Amino acid sequence: MRDPRIVRFYLNKDLKKRAARGEHNFLNRFCAVLERAGFRTAFHVLTESERLKSASRPGYAVYLMQPPMTARGLTIRKNYIYPFWKIESDAERWDWPVARAIFDPHTAPQPEAKRFTNRWRKKLFGESAEQTRRDGFVYVPLQGHLLDHRSFQSCSPIEMLEQIATLDRDRAVVATLHPGEDYTPAERDALTALMERTPRLKLTDQSMIPLLQGCDYVATQNSSVALSGYFFHKPAALFARIDFHHIAANVHDLGVEKALRQAPHMTPDYDAYLWWFLQDQSINAGHPDGEAKIEAALRRAGWIT
């Protein structure tokens, strides 16, 4: 028996309300494509209970930032910056096709790519991203789980900090904590101990923009701060797998010593890359080709022909 032609969207509470009211452009366009293909749509709040129920419900499912619970499921996720979105069969960014793709700066159309990046640079950061310098420090935006070495990481975040401070002796190391994380006493104690034995390492509550303006490069596991740094033409060293790795010094590929040695001197074509990563490799919900790209994603998934 064929699966019923219904697609259920599992969204957070706010997004579900906006989608039901027709107030979210990407979801409006997604639903328009589905309805033209003969699907009905429904919206659910993505609770744990609803997520589990979705596995046995007939039809198709779309999950916000969660792995699909059914073979007829897809994941949607903002591609870091609104209105750029991804539709994928997997929730882990580092496993997405873009992460395996090869970036060739010569394929970016010019001057379109430069105009695109300049427009978004100004929209996101005003004049700040044009006012950069190198003040002799490494900017390390920390995320969570400071003491854990997870499968997609080359080492734990606390080990990363120690390696940066040990191997890059030409620069101060300036780290920040993630405002959305609740750090344990053990994590804070480990940070304090590391700073006590490493005078060049300091923790700051300074905001991202001035740190990107002044740093020599960004070193992180896979924080999106590194992607923001590309708008400032700041190179990155990445200690974990992620989808925007193509123009960074990757510890998984190079080893930590070589990655930290190369990172400060890298001069990739940031503008071409940002066009490729955002406009070419994701769905711009505000662009005329948005629905064509949604259709292409659904064809790849086998939902439409």
Image: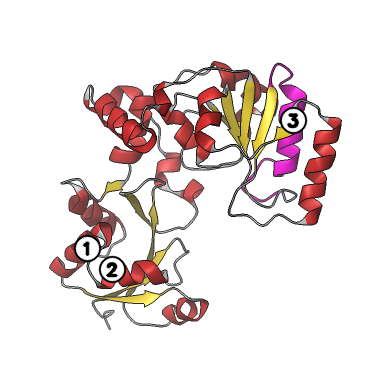
Circle nearer the N terminus (2, 1): 2
- Is 289 left or right of 231, judged from the image as shown? left
Residue 216 % position (x, y): 57, 21
Q: Are marks 2 and 1 in contact (CB under 8 Å)?
A: yes
Magenta stretch containing residue 88, yes or no?
Answer: no
Real-space Cα separation, disc 1 to disc 3, in angstroms: 47 Å
Which marked residue is nearer to the observer: mark 3 or mark 2? 3
Question: What type is the residue that disc 3 sits on?
Answer: Leu
Q: Which residue corresponds to the image point at 32% horizontal and 72% vertical from the top-left?
A: 17
Q: Which residue is mark 2?
A: 19
Secondary structure state at the residue bearing disc 2: helix
The disc at residue 28 is: 1
Residue 229 % position (x, y): 48, 31
Q: Which residues are magenta?
A: 149-171
The disc at residue 95 is: none
Secondary structure state at the residue bearing disc 3: strand
Q: Residues within 10 Å of mark 3 (few under 14, many from 20)?
A: many
266 up-or-down from 119: above or below = above
Q: Are marks 1 and 3 in contact (CB under 8 Å)?
A: no
Real-space Cα separation, disc 2 to disc 1, in angstroms: 7 Å
Real-space Cα separation, disc 3 to disc 2, in angstroms: 45 Å
Question: What type is the residue that disc 1 sits on?
Answer: Asn
288 up-or-down from 204: above or below = below
Q: Which residue is mark 3?
A: 201
